[in-house]
Amino acid sequence: MFTRREFLAGSGLIVAGTLGGNVWGTNPNLDTNSIVVPVDLGKVTGALPHFWEEIAGSDRVVVGLREQWRQDLVRVHRDIGIRSIRSHGLFNDEMGIATGPAHQFNFLYVDQIYDFMLDQGVKPFVELSFMPEAFATSNNRIFAYKGNTSPPRNWQDWHDMVRAFADHCVKRYGAAEVRQWKFEVWNEPNIDFWAGTQEEYFELYRQSALALKSVDSRLQVGGPATAQLGWIPDLIHYCAARNLPLDFVSSHIYPDDPQERIFGRAKMYPFEQVIPRGVELARHQIETSVMPHLPLFITEWSSQNPAFIFDTIQNCIGKAEALSYWTFSNVFEEGGVPSGVFNDVFGLLDQWGIARPSLHAFNFLHRLGEERLQTGVGPVLATRRSDGSLAILVWNLLPAADSSSVANGNPMAANAGGNSARDAELAVTLQLRGLSGRTQTRIGRIGGDVGSALPTWRAMGNPQYPSRDQLIQLRKSAELPPPETRALQGTEAEEISLRLPPNGVAMLEFDR
């Protein structure tokens, strides 16, 4: 199975204290790995902004006209709190913006898509890409939809189009609204998405930033939107030297990215640490620059493994203003039309809106509180909500060497990658203090067959095109069962024990 980077090219135990979270390995001589983690529910250790909800990725802008995409958007906003959507291809010819007479721009499709998004309470995170064919210097193109990756023949054409687009948005939605959006210049210009040089990208950035600010000086622009955290110090230096606006830094990182390009050495960190270590590096590059207070937006990362998702989020707390999951919907056509109801294409949902375990993982994250509570070392994240209720996440992340390739974050995988081996189970005992007389907890779980429609689909005989009745069954089987209700003694301190399958997760909720 190809990774996303390979596709483009062709068109265990962490010592406590080294990182905020942990990857818990297994002992082949034991039936079950066991840990004990103390949790003090009365001690707040800091705020927990839901930075993973700020943005989610999508295929390209035009799919916002599709009914399934729209249904998926409604669900991810409602169930996991996604606040904005980032998509490629705003200026692709299929959007019609620059396909008519010179400087007579057509924003019909933009309006239809953005109107729908805003009506749902979701804002655009605007990626300015790709090049209209009428402006392009070459026929270099990317993906099945043939997004043109070349620089423009005339920089003024690009400047005028970006300015006209921003002016149209301000007039349609109001300056107060559009000032809340982010405008990101291009996508991954340091790899196959840009046929020009770094210098030409910087000129593209300059033209874009000046065009946006000429409409309203308070519009927010940033970049370099690079793969593998590239060019961050370069863009900051470029903008500072020319007194150009730079309101935020954005870049991407995947767990299977080549580490020599990020850290300067291959295999420097375990697979599970690549994203948080990379985010730490990007934050350090900003803080040691001449613009040390710039916000950091990681506008692409991915995993289909709930335990990997939890561990990554925990280890990135306080290091980035946003961590944008790629992508929320399986309406995704970089490699052409997806084949079948279940496939290896990105998304929190499969075709026909069938939930994946990764969607449920983000629902658990959404239900966390806004304050982080004290825990001992372990795969545990404890929080308190504004109403005084409590929510605790627990997970069993297998190191990549001990599991199948899909188990630990392969972004093209469509399942949680569970391993049925008994020695991969984790027994967790939570030593809870500060329960304040609570008498019960609800325990929700994801893992194994729980939260996945694949077992039901296989029992049907793996139909490529399920019937309408079968689709109803698949959607139902993908949802989580009601949580277990477990009685407590009503004392201040109590132990709760859980057994988690490989890469399985659990959420404990305590009412006030």
Image (spheres, grey):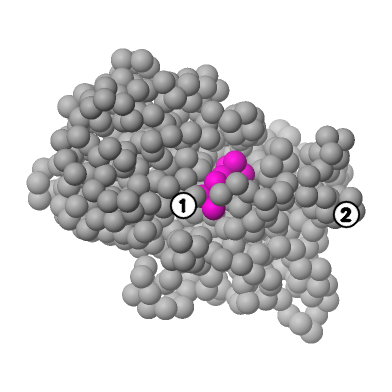
Is residue 91 in the magenta section? no
Q: Identify the residue position indicated by label 1 in the image.
A: 143
Q: Mark 2 packing: few (<14 Cα in 10 Å), some, or many (20+)?
A: few
On the rendered structure, is 104 left or right of 427?
A: left
Give residue 184's position: percent from left, percent from top.
33, 41
Amino acid type of the residue that numbered disc 1 sits on in the rendered structure: Phe
Up/down of 130 relative to 7, above or below: above
Up/down of 505 relative to 24, above or below: above
Is residue 333 in the magenta section? yes
On the rendered structure, is 273 left or right of 307?
A: left
Give residue 245's position: percent from left, percent from top.
19, 39
Tell me which residue sits at (38%, 29%) in the image: 96
Query: Which residues lie in the magenta part?
Result: 328-335
Q: Can residue 269 be spotted in the picture?
A: yes
Which label belongs to residue 382? none
Amino acid type of the residue that numbered disc 2 sits on in the rendered structure: Gly
Q: Secondary structure at mark 1?
A: loop
Tell me which residue sits at (31%, 20%) in the image: 168
Give residue 103's position: percent from left, percent from top.
23, 25
Number of dots carrying numbers: 2
Tell me which residue sits at (46%, 52%) in the image: 143
Q: Secondary structure at mark 2?
A: loop
The reply to whether discs 1 and 2 touch (Cβ–Cβ < 8 Å) is no
Name the foreground residue: 182 vs 280: 182
Single out the residue that lies furthest toward the bottom: 29
Tell me which residue sits at (69%, 42%) in the image: 351
Q: In the picture, which quadrant includes the N terminus?
A: bottom right
The CA span between labels 1 and 2 is 32 Å
Using the rendered view, name the quadrant where residue 38 is placed.
bottom right
On the rendered structure, is 31 left or right of 46?
A: right
Q: Identify the residue position indicated by label 2 in the image.
A: 461
